[in-house]
Image: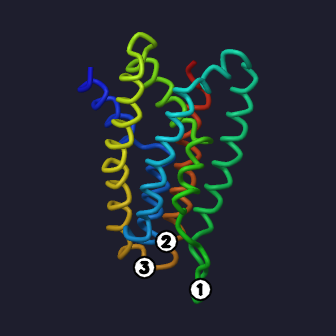
Amino acid sequence: MLWLLITYAVASTITPGPNNLMLFASGANFGLRRSVRHIFGISLGHVIMIGGLGLGLAQIFAVMPAAHTVLKICSAIYMTYLAYKIATAAPPSGVASTATPMTLWQAAAFQWVNPKAWAMHLNALTLFAPPEAGWLGFLTVIIVIPLINTPCVTVWAVLGSKTKRWLNAPRRLRAFNITMALMLIASILPILRAGVPV
């Protein structure tokens, strides 16, 4: 069962999604070193979110189906805002940039409006921590997913940082950021259409 959870965690966290696309953009715009807090913030957010869901927060969707709709609307609004921030991160030539990478706590809080994180954690708890597994199943999920997540998302920040030299030209950086913003919006559409599993 542990190997199945590890495989699930790798597949869920290394594939394109809002976190990875934002880390790719962060690596390209700010470099790997300045993106480290963002990386660890994602993993911290996973721990907090799995903990909350495991302690009964997931039941909100069963009791209040409207909460699912509210989550989708909030997610879409916030993702659109983040896409805008990414698209406008490249300053015009000759103007100093005031953009900063995501902080630890911003990245952790982002998981609560990330529909992929909701789907991933609800599925993980359902599949690998059913009631009969007790606390051991819950603790396994809350430990394994963040441990696997950290190196997987780091790959995206490293890949982004490798493009930094090529993106030195302001026009290329602007085009890159607009492309990443559009991809971020596109990445959430299938998840929002599919809904959050309960």
CB under 8 Å between discs 2 and 3: yes
Give residue 25's position: percent from left, percent from top.
47, 61
Asked if one can make out residue 76 in the rendered structure from this viewpoint, the answer is: yes
**Which part of the image, by quadrant, shows the C terminus?**
top right
> Which picture quadrant has residue 112?
top right
Label 2 secondary element: helix
Residue extending farthest to the top is: 132
> Which picture quadrant has residue 99?
bottom right
Label 1 secondary element: loop
Label 3 secondary element: helix
Give residue 68's position: percent from left, percent from top.
69, 26
Q: Residue at x 63, y 62 (%)?
A: 85
Q: Residues within 10 Å of mark 1 (few under 14, many from 20)?
A: few
Q: Residue at x 38, y 20 (%)?
A: 128
Tag 2 residue: 173
Looking at marks 2 and 3 on the same chain, the residue that comes earlier in the sequence is marked by: 3
Tag 1 residue: 96
CB under 8 Å between discs 1 and 3: no
Tag 3 residue: 168
Q: Nearer the viewer, residue 117 or 83?
A: 117
Which amino acid does the dot numbered 3 rest on? Asn
Q: Nearer the viewer, residue 48 or 95?
A: 48
Which amino acid does the dot numbered 2 rest on? Leu
Q: Nearer the viewer, mark 1 or mark 2?
A: 1
> Which picture quadrant has residue 167?
bottom left
Q: Nearer the viewer, mark 1 or mark 3?
A: 1
Asked if one can make out residue 194 in the rendered structure from this viewpoint, the answer is: no
- Between marks 1 and 3, how big is the CA–CA gap? 14 Å
- Between marks 1 and 2, how big is the CA–CA gap? 14 Å
Image side of residue 167 versus residue 115, left or right: left
Which amino acid does the dot numbered 1 rest on? Ala
Residue extending farthest to the bottom is: 94
